[in-house]
Amino acid sequence: MRITTQMMYSQFNANLQTTADSLYKEDEQIATGKKLNRPSDDPAAVSSITSEKAQLGAFASYQDAISSATLLLNATNSALDNLHSLIVNAKQIGTNATSASPQDLATFATMIDNVINSTIGVANTKVGDKYIFSGYGTNQPAVDTTTGALTATSTNNLISTQINTGVSVNVNVTAAGLISSVAPLDNTTIIGAMSSLKTAIQANDQTGIQTSLAALDTLSASAVSSQSDIGVRLNRINLEKQYLTARDADVTNSVSDKLTLSDVEIAKLITDAQQKQTSLQSLRSISSGFLNTSLFDFLK
């Protein structure tokens, strides 16, 4: 094959470009101390690190969700504790009223009224700016402070929060059906049973008092059952938190290892760069002499 001047020129130019590019890359690595300065340096390694950093971001988001869910459920559990105490208080007042003199009944009725107001206060517990017993209507109280009935914005919906990939947990208990109803003057809810007890005490209706006390026994068991359910949810959240913490540590270490592997040996890199600099200068010198050769040099 005939070697032409154009072929020789192209080869010199290619060598110059390759050496210059390599020298530029090594200068950049010396400056940053890293082998990976852009995706093109090692697409597979950069893709892996990027993917794992995205995982770490997702873990952080789930941990935030877990913190919020834990806060809401702990507040709900404390509120249910208070409700249970109020039910016990109401039952004690009702029991005392069964043997009270007619003139003392008004006092017991007033005491029950105070318990009802405290129960309404618990039903309208807030965490931050959210009413925790209002279902989807978290921006409004669950129970009307005057009537004890559910407000129009209160719903019976459970609010679900995602705490890991494919894992969600309900973070609330609703007032509807447990604490109050649209028409609370019955024995089916806590405020309803307390209100019925108050009415029965005022009327010295012993049968009504016993009926309301029995209802409060049932509702007390329902409140305890709700607390048990919250305990199950908190346990699930804690397990997911432990798993995410462990995975976060594993992925963090993996990213750190990969970034460490991308660190350069500065001394070796400087030596290589100096050698390439010498090579580049030699190529430039040779190409300069070659390019100065003209047709007349061949005709001599």
Image (cartoon, helix red, strand yellow):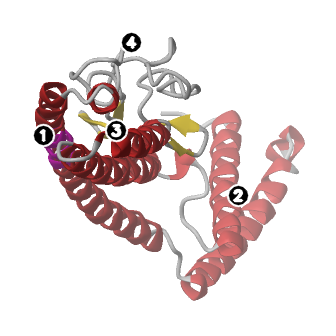
Please identify the quarter of the rendering in which residue 34 is found. Answer: bottom right
User: In the rendered picture of this protein, how many numbered marks are placed on residues?
Assistant: 4
Cα separation, mark 1 vs mark 3, equals: 26 Å
Q: Distance between the residues labelled 1 and 4?
A: 22 Å
Question: What mark, if any, has residue 20 been given in the picture?
Answer: 2
Q: In the figure, is residue 263 to the left or right of 212? A: right
Q: Name the residue under label 1.
A: 217
Q: Earlier in the sequence, mark 2 or mark 4?
A: 2
Residue under the image location 27 percent in, 22 percent down: 177
Point out which mark residue 171 bears. 3
Q: Which of marks 3 and 2 is in front?
A: 3
Q: Residue 268: image x %, image y %?
A: 55, 84
Q: How crowded is mark 1: few (under 14 residues within 10 Å), some or many (20 or more)?
A: some
Please provide the residue range marked out in magenta. Answer: 220-228
User: Does label 1 or label 3 sit earlier along the sequence?
Assistant: 3
Q: Which of 169 and 140 is in front in this view?
A: 140
* Disc 4 residue type (three-letter): Val
Q: Where is residue 125 in the image (x, y as percent from the top left)?
A: 49, 42
Residue lying at 17% horizontally and 46% vertically, measured from the top left? 224
Q: Residue 182 carries which label?
A: 4
